[in-house]
Image (cartoon, rainbow, N blue to C red):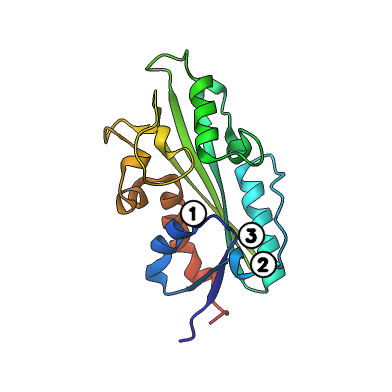
Amino acid sequence: METIDVVIATRNSGKLREIRQILAPLGLKILSLRDFPEIPEIVKDGQTFEENAVKKAAAAARQTGRIAIADDSGLAVDALQGRPGVFSSRYAGENATDADRYLKLLKEMARVPKGRRGAAFLCALAVASPEGKVEIVEGECRGEIASSPQGAQGFGYDPVFFLPELGRTMAELEPEGKNRISHRARALEKLKKVLPNFLKGYQ
């Protein structure tokens, strides 16, 4: 059976690595937007993670002529009324580093006491065909905002996202451990169940 090309609508190497690992059992040929440098950056201007994921997946599918998968994910902090939310990647400005973002978050959370530092990583994943067919799945991982960054694994807000049941931040987990419990992993497990049917006709 011919291998199906699937484009992951991202240029983020950490995100791409996670998605590749989790989707590996499906035997797909995984490409990314780095394989299509002519495609301009897709603007994320939706009000929700779902809107952004669909917009990215549909645009990538249309412009590459292949099935495309896109995620939009971020951190929703209870004490900040759900911020940074859809603005997670732009929380400290357009060209900020991961450290800039999580250090800004820690500064905003400095006066929030333990017990009120709940947060969730949220992920919406969309798969789209060039013809416009779309499916959406979601994943969530609850935790707390740590008082200081810990760990060197992962990316984004992982160093300050503490998992009480494990006694570690997300950045202290090995990739295999993170890929069992993260918001993106949970959404991808759901996606693995709908993808085979979605891909029928593309073999």
Q: Hey, what amino acid is under mark 2?
A: Pro
| Residue depicted at 50% across the width and 29% down the height | 103
Q: Position of residue 120 (x, y in %)?
A: 46, 34
* Label 1 SS: helix
Residue 96, percent across and down?
60, 39
The mark closer to the camera, 3 or 1, is 1
Quadrant location of residue 135?
A: bottom right
Quick check: 115 left or right of 56? Answer: left
The disc, 3 or 2, on the residue closer to the chain's N-terminal end is 2
> Left or right of 70: which side holds 154?
left
Residue at numbered disc 3: 57
Outermost left residue = 166
| Residue matched to label 2 | 37
Quarter residue 90 falls in: top right
Q: Can residue 84 be seen here?
A: yes
Amino acid type at circle 3 is: Ala
Residue 123 percent location from the top left of the image: 51, 46
Amino acid beneath label 1: Lys
